Image (cartoon, coloured by chain):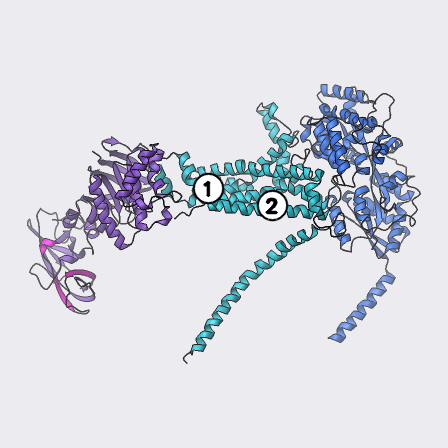
Amino acid sequence: MANVVLRSVNKQFGEVKVIKDVNLTVEDNEFVVFVGPSGCGKSTLLRLIAGLEDLTSGEVHIEEERVDHLAPSKRGVAMVFQSYALYPHFTVRQNMGYALRVAKESKETIAKKVNDAASVLQLTEYLERKPKALSGGQRQRVAIGRAIVRDPKVFLFDAPLSNLDAKLRVQMRIELTKLHRSLNATMIYVTHDQVEAMTMADKIVVLRDGKVEQIGAPLDLYNAPDNLFVAGFIGSPSMNFFDGTVINTSNTDVEIDVKDSVKIKFPLNEPSNLSTGDKVSFGVRPEHFTIGNTNQGTFTGEVYAVERLGGETYLYLYVGDQKEVVAHMSGDQKIAIGDMVEIGFSLKQSYLFGPHGDAVR
Amino acid sequence: MRKFTTRALLVAAALSASVSTLAASELNFWSWRQEDIAAYEKIIAAFEATHPDIKITYTAHEAKAYNTILTTALAGGSGPDIIHTRAYGSLEAISGAGYLEALDGQVDLSLLSADELLGTTLRADGRIYAVPFASQTVVVYYNKDIFDANNITVPETFEEFKAASTALKAAGITPLANGTADGWTVEIMSGAIMPNFYGSGFFGEVTSGATDFEDARYVGALEKMSELAEFMPTGFEGVDYATMKALFTSGAAAMFIGGSWEINGFRDAGINFEIMPGPAAEAGGERMVATWLDGGYGVNAASENKEDALEFIRFTATTPFAQMLTDELNNVAAVDGAMSSDATLSRVSSFHSAATPYIMLVAFRFDTPTGSTLLQSGLQELMTGAKTAAEVAADVSNGIKTAE
Amino acid sequence: MSMTNADYEKAKRNRTLKLKLWLLFLILPPAAILIVFVFVPMGSAVWYSVFDWDGLVRKEFIGLANFQDILFNPLKNKVLFNAFMNNVKVFVSLMLVQNGIALVIALLLARNPKGYRFYQVVFFLPVILSTVIIGFQWKLFLNPVFGLVNKFLHNIGLHDWALPWLGLPETALNSMLLVNSWHWFGFPTLVFLAAIHRIPKDFIEAARLDGASEWRIAREIIWPLMAPAITIITVLTFIGSFNWFEIPYIMNGLEGSPAGSTDMLGLMFYRTAFGSVSAGGSNFGSGSALAVLMFIFIFVFSIIATKYLTSREVEMN
């Protein structure tokens, strides 16, 4: 059971708190992605698990064993660095076998494990090369191979794809997912790219300012973000937010006025503590807009930019004084810059956030 | 423009002509004796009083750099009119190159001994290129207060010297201030100890080639020298010249073997000292002091005022000059006839009745490696016990024979 | 006003000319300095070395006789060999002691200990002091009678250890080497530290995750990756060792006292070329020949060493 459990983990650099009371469980064989904007503490959290940083307080458990007092190499984790950190003076074979050599494994065992990993990663023909003679993707695979060879309980990835070009990144994403399935290993993956998080993760941990904002399966985060931050962070392009004011509340719905023009009656699944006059944010994802009036709600805006990709179209509109409202339509839309367009939405696919950013459901 | 230049030249020429006819000739006099500036200015003033048409400017350069400064100037065709020269090998470098005026026949040298003139004679042509000015003598300084306080009688023989040293050592006093860190100070020390063992005949024989430094007399003298190591300061191997002087002037050491030029310094330091020649080999044996000529006064062969410069050089070969040198500088003047009012200096002069040339400097400093280099290195090895007297003698002897 | 083809060509030529003039302006001054202060003296040393110049006046051309004299005259080549072996000893010792200590300190400082900046400054301080002052100061410290070193040894009861450090053939050179190491170790420390800082932290963390001990990391990861710094320091130490002059001259004199145990090629050159009170007159011919031999030796070895050491350097990325 190679699970990872963090309990009340705190980390301070001097006076600066970078990780604030993080509690988290990574199940065995789970692929968990830590995601968040730069500086949110996601890499630090990963390094705390690896043991490259010491905890200020809290506990780290791996496979039901407390490890935060152990040296990195004793925790049963392997890490793939953003820079790959391949030793430039070693060949691929030496790089991949280094940990085994340090562990004083026999020559035969090392050769076998390295060869096995190399064949899985299609690196066999590059084994005698130095990292300098490899492409970015190949180096990436060597870095992963170095981790695989160690047969760790937990794989840690620190933004491993950020140095690759877009095409290679997509390819590696799929390969990593495949690898996860074939290795049946617990993996923790750090990225600032929510697309990587959405496509690869079994479970996403959204971090901001050292705090966990929400933990959940990708589509749960997409469909039911707990707060304004997660709602804005997950999904691309980001959710559109409109400032509004509560004008009426009841047990079943909340009536809000958005920009003195549009009045929306937002249905409630659970009681809210909103009261009249509260400032709220109303959110609609770009892909949930449709052209033309709907009965549930409609904004009217002037188009100031159109991006036509053939299969899909992005509209950028001014709605009142609100700039940059994005609408995502499938197919090609016959809309030109300067057109006044009505965009409609359904109440089922819209979101309401209270004065403190918490989701109202 | 052209007219102006011509006219300016004419005026300048006229001016310079009138200056040279009206004013006294100006002579430059270079030396390395920075500590003697005041005394030399006095001496020069005395000379100028009788020669109103000659003006001499004395310039003293830093002693270590003097040879380089002087030779560079001479090689560049400039240089002073009057040159304070060193003696022996150092003088040959300049006189051999033709930079000095030969003085024999131009200057009356009758008040100088042949031994002294040897130091300023160029071996190649046998002519004399400088008037010898003063000699240096190796003596043993001893602290009278320490001797009295420990009831030590002044030793006469080497055995007495060792006995006195043993007594001093037992009393907690370092008998000898000498160290070996600076090679030249060990050579000086050998100049006090060794001659009385190798004897007065050795110098002539070794310079003529009748014997060499492996001679039993020389080896024996070296052995005696090595017997003194135990009376030198603890860690004498690292004691340099400055430390030696500090040990003696502070009263930490009772004796100091050194050159006669130390007299002034020791007197200024206020110690109650007296000097003696190196101890005799046995009772009634000769007590020779090693001496050498310190240098001389020469004339730049390229000087424009050669006759005036020679006039000053003639003055340096007279007794009045020697007397001033003695009075002002406490030097043992090379020129005869000067009487010293200084008791210690008179004693140094009196030691000269049994003088022997300071062997390596006087006779073996013409080729490389010099006898001094070989002996200094050998003595360091001898005193520290790294080599035996016979090995050192062999090294010195072979070195001198192989030198060009 | 449209430009013709010829106008464009002219403007282009003009631009190249300007660039060339600018490059010339940049190159000329250092080239001039190099020629006047390096090549001309070097050339004249070679020129002087083929003349009989024993004394003040240059005499006739004698071909390679000066070289022959230095290399094959049994007395001189004995001195030469002794001095050369001392220089070799200086090089080996400085590599081990001075640069070894510097490496250890650099490895420690690279871990950002508390007071890191302070130590860095303190360790570098002796480097900026004048060699003359350091030589003189340590000569006083090592004085057997008044020196602080022996006083200290006596005070802590190590009476047998209080030796005349500079006076014994067995300790004189070693003492001077320690002084030189004390004087200079801050420089290699700084160079090594910069080299270690240049190694991405990831390499070391990766190795740590791979289970390598600190010693193993230093030996297998840091050491090979700081090869360029090792090359520079090795070659500089080599050149410095074979040109070593100031400390031996100040602390033990021109003759390499005691008994030649601290003699160096540099001292021998000085004595030969310029003469000294004990060593005799100047001989520019022989001195120049020795200087030429020293130059050829240092030059050739530096190039071989640089070539060899550079070949084992790896690029970091």
Label of residue B328 in the image = none
Task: Give the residues drawn in magenta, as a range.
Answer: A322-349
* Residue at screen point 86% across, 51% down: B101
- From the viewer's perspective, tell me whether residue A243 is left or right of residue C51: left
User: In the rendered view, would you say B15 is above or below A281?
Assistant: below
* Drawing shade for chain C: cyan
Question: In the displayed structure, does residue C73 sit left or right of residue A119?
Answer: right
Residue C244 position within the rendered picture, expressed as x and y whole percent measured from the top left: 61, 42
* Residue B247 coordinates in the image, percent (x, y): 71, 29
Q: Quadrant of the N terminus of chain C?
A: bottom left
Taking depth in this image into account, of A43 and A83 the one nearest to the observer is: A83
Mark carried by residue C297: 2
Using the image, tell me which numbered label, if any, was put on residue C117.
1
Q: Is residue C44 above or below residue B150?
A: below
- Mark earlier in primary sequence (1, 2): 1
- Chain letter of disc 1 in the image: C
The chain painted blue is B
The residue sitting at the bottom extreme is C1
Looking at the picture, does residue C52 appear above or below residue B283? below
Q: Which chain is purple?
A: A
